[in-house]
Amino acid sequence: MPPDVVIRGGTVVDGTGAEPARADVAIAGGRVVEIGAVPPTEGVELDAAGCLVAPGFIDIHSHSDYTLLVDPRAVSAIRQGVTLEAIGNCGHGCFPIRKPELARSIIYGYDEEVPLSWTTMPQYLERLQQARPAVNVLTLVPNGQLRLDAVGLQERPATPEELAAMSLTLEQALDDGAWGYSTGLEYAAETGVPEEEIEALCRVVARHGALYATHTRDRDASAVEAVEEAIRTAEHAGVRLQVSHLVPRSGFEAGHRCIETVEAARARGLDVAFDMHTRLFGFTFLSSVLPAWAVEGGPERLADALRDPSARRRMKSHRSILSAGDDWGRIVLLDNDVWPEYARRDVASIAAERGQEPLDAIYDLLAADTQRLHRLMALIHCYSEEQQREAFSHPLCMPGSDATTLAPDGPLADSIFHGAYTWAAWFYRFMVRETRLLTPQEAVRRLTQLPAERLGLADRGVLRPGAPADIAVFDPETYGERGTPFEPNQTAVGMRHVLVNGVLTLRDGGETGERGGTVLRRPS
C-alpha cells in the first residue's frame, strides 16, 4: 500500500527512550508503515526539518468527559501534540447517570449544553463516538458516580446491597471496555467511603487486570497517611495502582515522604506509579467546601441551608479540599459572571472586605446562584518549583493535565480550566530546555510510552511500523506554553503537525478541521 502521508527530514524520537535518529515516517491506512529513508511518493508530504517526530502525547489524567461532547475539536490538546486522553479520573465522570441532578455536580465543565440523556457507560461512549472527537479517548469508571447512583450524597458506608449494586455496575463497565476505576476521596460524593469498600471494588478491577487510579483522601495534613491507605488497599486487593497528582498541598517534606512511600511499595512488588499536574496550584469548585448532606437536596434546599445560621454552623465542621489548610489567603476566586467584582482575589481579603469569617463569605457567594455552582471556581496556591523538580525527575512519574480540553473560540471560548492549554508544553519546556533534568527522548517517553504502559495500551505510545499513526511533530527549541494563571486560554506554540490515527489534524501550525479520534475500549 503506497503511503498516504510522509513526514520528511525530521528527527524521530520513538517514545521508548532510544537515541533520536534522522528518518522519514510513512503512513498508510491510519498506521505507520515505514521509518527510514522513504522514496518519493504521490502522498501528502510534511516538512519536519528541524523538528522532533514523536508519538502523539498521552494525557493519563484528563477531565474532558463532558467538554469533548460540547466541542470535540480539542484545540487545547491538539495544539500541544496530545492525541489520547484518559478520562473518568478523580471519581468524576459521565456515567452511570440515573439521577442527573446529582450527577452533574461531579462533571467538570457541565453547563446544560449537552443534556445528560444517557444512563450507562456504553450509552455514554456511543454518544462520545458520535461527537467525533479530535483525540482518542478511553475511560476509567468513576467511583463518585457509582456512589451517587447507589448511595446518593450520604456520608456513610454503602450497605451490602448498595455495594453489590456498585460492584455489578463496575463489573459491567469493565466488561464493556473501561480501562480501570478511579476514586476521588476528598470530594463530597466520596467522603463517606471506608477503605474496606474501596478494597472490595478494587478486587473487581484486579480480576480484570485493569488499573486503579486514586485522588487520595487527604492531600493536606494527612497526605502521607492517605497515600499509605491507597497502597494498602491496592496490596490487599492485588490491583495495579496509579496515585493521581501525588504531590500533596502540605509542603516539600510531605511530598518527599509520599514519594518514598510509593518507592517502598514498589520495592515490595506492588505495581504502582504516579502522575502529577504541572500547575503550581490546585484547582477546583468553590462549592467543594460544602458537605454532601448540604448538596443532596438540590439547589433550592441548598439555598435555604446556606442562609440558615444553624445549618452554617454544622457545615463549618466539614473539612474540605479548600478548608483543610486553614489558610484562606492561598484560595483565589477565578474570573466568573456571578461575582465578577471578586475575581482574582483571595478569600481572606474578600471576607475581610465583607466583614465576615472566610467560610461565611464563601457561603454567601455560593448562595447567590445555587443553580450554577460550577461557575465559581478557585485555585489553591500550594506547590513550589522544588516540588515539581523532584516529582517530574522521578522515574515513576508522568505528567497529566488534570484539566478539560477547551478551544479559544466556539462554545467553550469562555470556559477556563487551568492546565488545559499548557500542561504538555510546560513539561517539555521546563524539564528539557529550562532545567535540563530530562533529555528530549526521556521527556517524550514520559508523555508517550510510560502512560501507555500504565493504562495497558499495547499499540500506542511508540512510533514503529504497524502502530496507529498518532504523531506529534514539533520544534524542540520553541515548543512551549503561553497560558498564565489569569490568562490561561492561550494556545501552545511550536507544534508543527499532528496526526491522529493517520488523520492530519494540525498542519504547518494550523488546524485542518479534520478529526480522527476514536473511543478506545479495553479488550475483554
Image: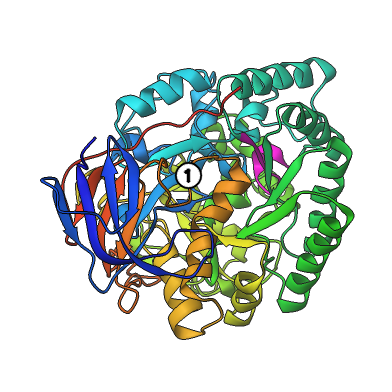
Q: Residue at x 47, y 78 (%)?
A: 432
**Residue 387: image location, x then y, percent:** 64, 76
Could you tell me which quadrant the C terminus lies in?
Answer: top right
Q: Nearer the viewer, residue 403 or 133?
A: 133
Q: Quadrant of residue 509?
A: bottom left
Q: Is residue 174 visible?
A: yes
- Mark 1 neighbour class, 10 Å CA radius: few under 14, some 14 to 19, many 20 or more: many
**Does the magenta run of residues contain 321?**
no
Q: Is residue 511 left or right of residue 174?
A: left
Identify the image's colour scheme: rainbow, by chain, secondary structure or one colour.
rainbow
Could you tell me which quadrant the N terminus lies in?
Answer: top left
Tag 1 residue = 460
Task: Find numbered disc 1 in the image and state the secondary structure of the residue it sits on.
Answer: loop
Q: Amino acid at mark 1?
A: Arg
**Does the magenta run of residues contain 188?**
yes
Q: Quadrant of residue 360?
A: bottom right
Q: Residue at x 49, y 24 (%)?
A: 100
Q: Is residue 270 left or right of residue 333?
A: right
**Residue 101: image location, x then y, percent:** 50, 27
**Residue 472: image location, x then y, percent:** 33, 57
Q: Is residue 337 visible?
A: no
- All told, the count of numbered labels is 1
Farthest residue in the left direction? 42
Q: Residue at x 40, y 45 (%)?
A: 465
Image vertical order of residue 274 relative to residue 160, above or below: below
Q: Is residue 394 left or right of residue 28?
A: right
**Residue 379: image location, x then y, percent:** 51, 64
Residue span colored magenta: 180-191
